[in-house]
Amino acid sequence: MYENTLNLFKNIGTKISESAGKIYGTDEAGEIIGNGAGGDRTKKIDKVAEDIVISEISKNFDDFCIISEEAGIKFFGKASDNDCAQFFFVDPIDGSNNATRGIPLFATSLAFSTSQYINDTKVGYVRNIFGEEYYAGKGKGAYRINNGNKHQKKILMNSDTNVPEFLGVEFAPYGKNLDKISKIMQIAKHYRTVGSIALGLCYVAGGALDAYIDLRPPRILDLTAAKLIIEEAGGICFSDGKNLKVDTKTKANLIAGNKNVVEKVRSLLKI
């Protein structure tokens, strides 16, 4: 199941990369075509990517549920709200504002779970549309494939880091959460705002960033795949609630890093 699902996700990632790449940074990519289930406006590039995801999963699975940022919760085949053991958590384009602005930092985030709860995620996959792939299987470790390189590399987080020297952080509009996170920013040396939660978390898993903080808070659907990648790389993805039910609305504070860093951040923020 792991290999088949992972190969499916890789195939989807390739197809989205090819299709999204054609309209990336254009007025067409940012054309508003509706409202997503998560509450954001659906851009054309989001819909193009989501259509690929639904089509490809439908070709390979019979009875399943897709929970997607745009389409919402949809059951296929004989699956229903009371009878479903195959769930796909999907963010077709994570970082669509980057994509429509011409900033090449956006990703496809795909996860497979045996229930609608986040801790039952078995496979997680994140593809930087113009770059590397990150993925993990429950109990199988986390891996990265660099752009153009077919060889996978196992990634493990540095467990000795106590202070997030390179801190990834997402801000609320107009800096409304600056007071809340200012204590953490005072101990970090460098800051990075990626604009894609999935990619930001994968950078933590791979060691490019020491921690990632998002207290807006973000939707948990955005971090389902990356959470597993973080954990399989030896880190922690702390949020409100231990085993949240995944949907398009639920939000939770996010603090990701190794155990020492997460405890340091939580202590400073008193959460």
Image (tube, helix red, strand yellow):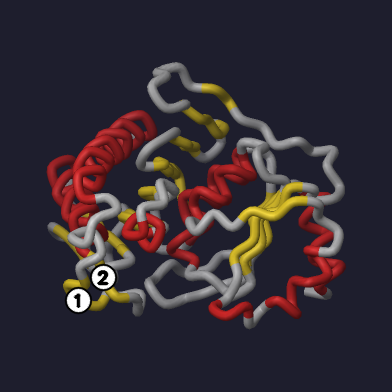
The quarter of the rendered structure image containing the N terminus is top left
Q: Nearer the viewer, residue 129 or 234?
A: 129
Disc 2 packing (10 Å; few <14; some 14–19; many ≥20): many
Q: Which mark is residue 2?
A: none
Is residue 160 rendered to the left or right of residue 7?
Answer: right
Dot 1 falls on a residue whose secondary structure is strand
Distance from Cα at disc 1 to Cα at disc 2? 5 Å
Q: Position of residue 255 (x, y in %)?
A: 68, 61
User: What amino acid type is highlighted by mark number 2?
Assistant: Thr
Relative height, residue 147 to residue 245 (above, below)? above
Identity of the residue drawn at 59% across and 57% down: 193
Q: Does residue 212 appear in the picture of this structure?
A: yes
Per the image, the residue denoted by label 2 is 42
Identity of the residue drawn at 43% across and 43% down: 126
Disc 1 packing (10 Å; few <14; some 14–19; many ≥20): few
Q: Position of residue 221 (x, y in %)?
A: 43, 63
Q: Position of residue 16 (x, y in %)?
A: 25, 44
Identity of the residue drawn at 49% across and 37% down: 136
Relative height, residue 197 to residue 266 (above, below)? above
The quarter of the rendered structure image containing the C terminus is bottom right
In contact (CB < 8 Å): disc 1 and disc 2: yes
